[in-house]
Image (spheres, grey):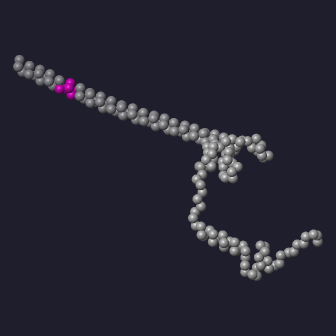
């Protein structure tokens, strides 16, 4: 055989080295202990507040620091730029984002924003045209109503004047 000998486990031992005839399982005991610990600490785990998921250029790191650009020196991505934090070596969670991915996200976001603004301007233009047309129709109706009133008012004065003239003529004719 060689310098080292190896023996097969007996059929009474499981893969963890526990004797199946003893009724004792170290694995089951570990599971029971873990469950007991979990049941004792029912308080929810509270994580520190994290900044919103950054879309496009990261504005702040999870630690509160300002992200800065660095250049990758790895063999997989040599020379590739990325955002990181100055505190990256302290073992905490810090921002990491490839620069080119951030630029593409920023461009897509700007494109979407420009599209939304263009739709708003178009809707405002349509609304303004409709509103202007409604105001114009309202003014035309008002002018028409005033013209009718004025013409009726003028016509009434004209009729009253004619009646007065006719009465005066009738009185003159009667007295002569």
Position of residue 171 measured from the top left corner of the image (x, y, whole percent): 8, 22
Front in this rendered view, residue 173 or 110: 110
Say whether residue 156 is magenta. yes
Q: Main secondary structure of the magenta part?
A: helix
**Can you say which quadrant of the picture contains the C terminus?**
top left
Q: Which residues are magenta?
A: 155-160
Q: Residue at point 70% right, 49% down?
A: 89
Image vertical order of residue 105 relative to residue 167, above or below: below
Q: Please say if 39 is above or below 94.
A: below
| Residue located 36% across and 31% down the image | 140
Which residue in the rendered view is the most extreme toward the front? 90
User: Residue 111, position in %: x, y?
Assistant: 61, 39
Residue 69 shows in this picture: yes
Q: Quadrant of the N terminus?
A: bottom right
Residue extending furthest toward the bottom: 21
Q: Would residue 157 be counted in the magenta stretch?
A: yes
Task: Name the residue located 58 percent from the left edge and 67 percent from the top edge.
Answer: 42
Q: Residue at x 67, y 52 (%)?
A: 92
Tell which of 65 and 106 is nearer to you: 65
On the picture, is 153 further left or further right than 109?
A: left
What x and y, as percent, mark residue 84? 68, 45
**Relative height, residue 164 to residue 13 (above, below):** above
Q: Quadrant of residue 22?
A: bottom right
Can residue 99 be spotted in the picture? no
Residue 141 spot, x, y in % from top left: 34, 33
125 or 47: nearer the viewer:
47
């Amino acid at each position: 055989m060689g310098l080292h000998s190896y023996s097969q486990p007996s059929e009474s031992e499981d893969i963890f080295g526990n004797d199946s005839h003893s009724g004792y399982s170290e694995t089951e005991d570990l599971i029971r202990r873990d469950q007991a610990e979990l049941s004792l600490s029912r308080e929810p785990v509270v994580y520190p507040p994290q900044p919103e998921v950054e879309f496009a250029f990261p504005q702040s790191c999870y630690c509160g620091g300002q992200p800065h650009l660095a250049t990758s020196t790895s063999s997989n991505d040599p020379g590739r730029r990325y955002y990181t934090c100055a505190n990256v070596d302290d073992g905490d969670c810090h921002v990491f984002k490839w620069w080119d991915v951030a630029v593409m996200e920023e461009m897509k976001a700007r494109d979407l924003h420009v599209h939304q603004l263009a739709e708003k301007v178009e809707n405002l233009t349509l609304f303004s045209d409709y509103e202007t047309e409604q105001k114009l129709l309202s003014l035309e109706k008002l002018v028409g109503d005033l013209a009718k009133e004025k013409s009726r008012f003028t016509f009434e004065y004209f009729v009253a004047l004619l009646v007065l003239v006719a009465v005066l003529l009738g009185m003159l004719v009667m007295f002569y």
